[in-house]
Image (cartoon, rainbow, N blue to C red):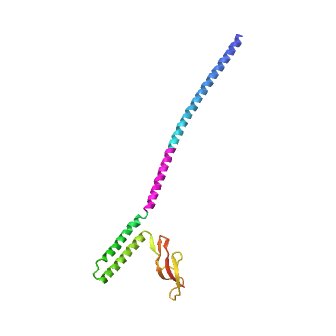
Amino acid sequence: MSKENNEEIQEETLEDTQLDELAQEAAAEAEAVENEFDLLQEELASLKDKYARVHADFDNIKKRLEREKYTAVEYSNEKFAKDMIPVMDSLQMALSSTASVADPQEHFEKLKEGIELTLKQLTTSLEKHGVTMVSHDEPFDPNIHNAVQSVDSDTVESGQIVQTFQTGYRYKERPLREAMVVVAN
């Protein structure tokens, strides 16, 4: 019996040793998994923080761009307004010059010259900002001309503009106001 007992004890000892080794391996593996889990948790927290910061930056940029857009739209006509101020100055000088009239004929000529210069100044300022007059020499185009009357004419071809009642204007390529014209039959 002792031999069988010895063998049994050896087998139990061997099983216990194998079980201890398996338990140690499992514990080491569990610790490695736990360490990897902790590292992944830290990485997840770091990524969440980065996401929150990027999202906040994006919101701030979006708000800033909205403010800049609002400001740009609000003050988009500032250059135009600055260019109109000298025209206003010229008109005010013309009005103030009427106070000291010595010779009416001379005053009329100077007033006419001043109005012509002011009109030229206004036209230049408008052209600088993309506003141009519709030419009277262009062929009739229903997109930019409004035919208010048609007349028979031997000197002008049918469909051509004979007379302009009111000048038309364009902003770049878009009509602002149609020219009111008389067209030949």
Question: Quadrant of the image for the N terminus?
Answer: top right
Q: Is residue 159 above or below residue 33?
A: below
The question of residue 138 being in magenta is answered with no
Overall secondary structure of the magenta section: helix
Q: Residue at x 54, y 36 (%)?
A: 41
Q: Residue at x 31, y 76 (%)?
A: 97
Question: Quadrant of the image for the C terminus?
Answer: bottom right
Horizontal side of 9 relative to 156 (left or right) equals right
The question of residue 68 being in magenta is answered with yes
How many discs mark residues in the rendered view? 0
Q: Nearer the viewer, residue 146 or 35?
A: 146
Residue reaching furthest bottom? 154
Q: Position of residue 128 (x, y in %)?
A: 41, 69
Q: Position of residue 95 (x, y in %)?
A: 33, 75
Horizontal side of 34 relative to 168 (left or right) equals right
Q: Nearer the viewer, residue 9 or 93?
A: 93
Q: Position of residue 38 (x, y in %)?
A: 54, 34
Q: Quadrant of residue 106?
A: bottom left
Q: Nearer the viewer, residue 17 or 145?
A: 145
Q: Residue at x 47, y 50 (%)?
A: 60
Q: Is residue 8 above or below residue 128?
A: above
* Numbered range of the magenta stretch: 51-75
Q: Position of residue 90 (x, y in %)?
A: 34, 73
Q: Is residue 72 above or below residue 13?
A: below
Residue reaching furthest top? 2
Residue 136 seen anywhere in this rendered image of the structure: no
Residue reaching furthest front? 99
Q: Residue at x 34, y 71 (%)?
A: 89
Q: Quadrant of residue 82?
A: bottom left
